[in-house]
Image (tube, grey):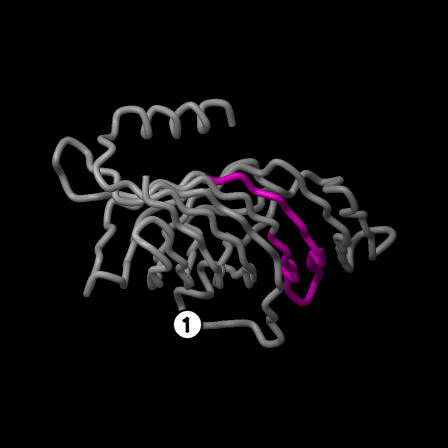
Amino acid sequence: MKKMLLGIVCLMCISESLGQKLEFTGGINLNRYLDADSFLDGYLPPGLKWDTGYQMALSLRSIRWWHCLPVKVTLRLDYVKGRIDEYYGGMGGGTSYHAAVDKINLGFGFFPVNIKIAKKFWVSIGGELSGRVWDHTTGEKWAFSMYATPPVRTWSLDDDALQLNKDFFFGVSADFSYDFWLSDVWHLAPHYRFYLGLTDEFRNLESSIRSVRNYFEMGIIRRI
């Protein structure tokens, strides 16, 4: 986590200060966990629901790197909620996981594509690296085997007893916002952002479980 924060400071220090904008955003996120292999095959299990969490972020827009196109960097704190309902097995037995997972993640986003359209509409595309700083997990693991004694066994997943939660994860993100100018210095900007995880959020599972999130945010911007 210290390396992540140090990287953010370095990015800000070596960038030029031409037309930069400092932005604070807050809002909600809608998260669900999907099996990546099933998702790519076009199959979504029935009954999946979006869980609502919260987020806040501090961003620097319009950072110009050595006279190149403007980029955007973001430091984000996410409170993310979601459920795991997974089953593996066949006629002779199987294993299932049923858990509710709440997490707080600290993430750094880098958006090399940061395009302004018609003076007020912004499109930003990039990647986000996040680290888990807190979690609360409840649920159970259930296993059945016709050849075992006893045939059914259960394990508690409370407080991440089986260490399912990974520490770091990475994904791609696309952000769309529109600036409402309050003055030459202050702006308001509603955002919609989509995040797709490219790395697994959990370990010790047979499936590749990744996060898909929608964000609805409001930002206040100051030109610096």
The answer to which image quadrant residue 159 occupies is top right
Q: Magenta region, mostly helix, strand or loop?
A: strand
Residue 91 part of the magenta segment: yes
Give the quadrant of the C terminus.
top left
Question: Could you tell whether 168 is left or right of 52 in the image?
Answer: left
- The residue segment tinted magenta is 80-107
Q: Horizontal and vertical percent for residue 55?
A: 55, 51
Residue for point 42% across, 23% down: 6
Question: Could you tell whether 92 is left or right of 189 in the image?
Answer: right
Observer-nearest of 124 and 60: 60
Question: Could you tell whether 149 is left or right of 199 in the image?
Answer: right
* Residue topped by disc 1: 42
Residue for point 29% across, 54% down: 124
Q: Horizontal and vertical percent for residue 79?
A: 61, 50
Farthest residue to the front: give it. 183
The answer to which image quadrant residue 66 occupies is top left
In the picture shown, does residue 168 fall above or below 87? above
Residue for point 81% across, 48% down: 156
Task: Name the element at disc 1.
Answer: loop
Label 1 environment density (alpha carbons within 10 Å; few <14, some 14–19, many ≥20): few
**Amino acid under disc 1:** Gly
Observer-nearest of 148 and 60: 60
Observer-nearest of 197 and 62: 62
Q: Horizontal and vertical percent for residue 122?
A: 28, 59
Farthest residue to the right: give it. 150
Q: Horizontal and vertical percent for residue 17?
A: 25, 33
